[in-house]
Image: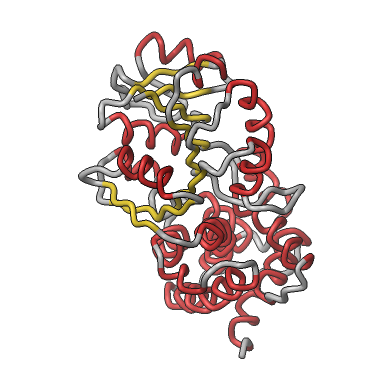
């Protein structure tokens, strides 16, 4: 079958490789014409994965019409900020095709989960989401990895699981599409906090302290916004939280480390944001506003907002942990 992937970032390409194992025809959409030229020449994208040669059943185009023509499954793997634009761009070529959302975050303007944004814009219930402890490079290296999957209907979930799960990648079905998405978003925020702790010079014990405390806050966020508390125990929850909060491969963690190690130096922080996509930064802004809108008080989120957005002293995070009831 033909599968369309919107986006050509590292995670998009890693999912393309996973999907290609089932002899599917994979076509990725990119806005960068140079990516198309390079890929057509040698089946490589040096600016993302220098040494990877992609198989012949993967191709790239900058035409939405070409990518979506005869596609039987769509993966959305773009920055959260562009999801609405992508939906509007694919709308002329979209005909109720099952969609899997691999992007993580909250839409910054509507403060809605991405599944809601896509559902409203494309008028479909054929939507599922995936989230879990999977760095792109680990997928590509065929390390044993896992994802949680949830959706609005069993048919879409089954189609994605059938084509994505393989001998190294496990998918586990969840009944909580709200909680899975909130886990995927909030864990990036906590990863920034973990990076701050490490940047301040504290030990792994203090990081573990933070991660453990954050579990309670994430459970409360999920429940307050309509999800199930137990979803924190899924691959999208504790699994992804542990990975993202302890690895220098995470841009969220690395961003937090800069805040802690430079005592929240505005220039260093801004420079990193200009050169890297830090999803947790945008998620923090959206989650903070959403919680305020819903009148849900999560002190850790408020404190992190003050540190990251308002340049407050990052040492306040450790003080908060010690004093938290």
**In-front residue for pair 25/82:** 25
State how many labels appear.
Answer: 0
**In-front residue for pair 56/4:** 4
| Residue 192 can be seen in this image | no
Q: Quadrant of the C terminus?
A: bottom right
Rendering coords of residue 198 (x, y %): 51, 66
Residue at horizontal 33 percent and vertical 40 percent from the top: 164
Judged left or right of residue 88, residue 258 is: left
Rendering coords of residue 11 (x, y %): 44, 38
Rendering coords of residue 109 (x, y %): 76, 47
Residue at horizontal 64 percent and vertical 72 percent from the top: 224
Which of the 4 quarters of the picture holds residue 26?
A: top left
Rendering coords of residue 1 (x, y %): 34, 25
Residue at horizontal 60 percent and vertical 54 percent from the top: 280
Relative to 142, is 51 above or below? above
Residue at horizontal 72 percent and vertical 53 percent from the top: 111
| Residue 104 can be seen in this image | yes
């Amino acid at each position: 079958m033909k599968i369309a992937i919107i986006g050509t970032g590292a995670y998009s390409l890693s999912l393309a490789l996973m999907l290609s194992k089932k002899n599917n025809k994979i076509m990725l959409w990119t806005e960068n014409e140079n990516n198309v030229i390079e890929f057509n020449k040698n089946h490589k994208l040096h600016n993302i994965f220098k040494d990877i040669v992609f198989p012949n059943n993967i191709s790239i185009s900058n035409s939405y019409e070409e990518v979506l023509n005869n596609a039987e499954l769509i993966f959305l793997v773009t920055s959260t900020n562009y999801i609405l634009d992508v939906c509007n761009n694919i709308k002329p070529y979209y005909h109720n095709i099952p969609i899997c959302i691999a992007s993580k975050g909250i839409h910054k303007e509507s403060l809605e989960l991405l599944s809601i944004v896509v559902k409203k814009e494309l008028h479909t219930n054929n939507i599922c989401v995936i989230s879990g402890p999977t760095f792109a490079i680990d997928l590509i290296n065929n390390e044993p990895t896992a994802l949680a999957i949830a959706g609005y209907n069993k048919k879409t979930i089954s189609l994605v699981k059938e084509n994505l799960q393989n001998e190294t990648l496990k998918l586990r079905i969840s009944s909580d599409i709200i909680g899975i998405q909130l886990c995927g978003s909030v864990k990036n925020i906590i990863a920034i906090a973990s990076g701050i702790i490490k940047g301040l010079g504290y030990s792994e014990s203090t990081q573990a302290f933070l991660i453990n405390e954050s579990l309670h806050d994430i459970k409360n966020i999920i429940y307050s916004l309509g999800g199930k508390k137990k979803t924190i125990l899924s691959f999208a929850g504790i699994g992804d939280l542990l990975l993202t909060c302890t690895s220098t491969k995470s841009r969220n963690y690395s961003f937090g480390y800069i805040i802690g190690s430079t005592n929240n130096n505005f220039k260093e922080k801004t420079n990193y944001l200009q050169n890297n996509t830090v999803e947790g930064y945008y998620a923090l802004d959206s989650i903070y506003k959403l919680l305020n809108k819903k009148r849900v008080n999560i002190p850790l989120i408020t404190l992190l907002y003050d540190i990251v957005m308002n340049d407050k002293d990052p040492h306040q995070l450790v003080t908060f942990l010690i004093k938290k009831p």
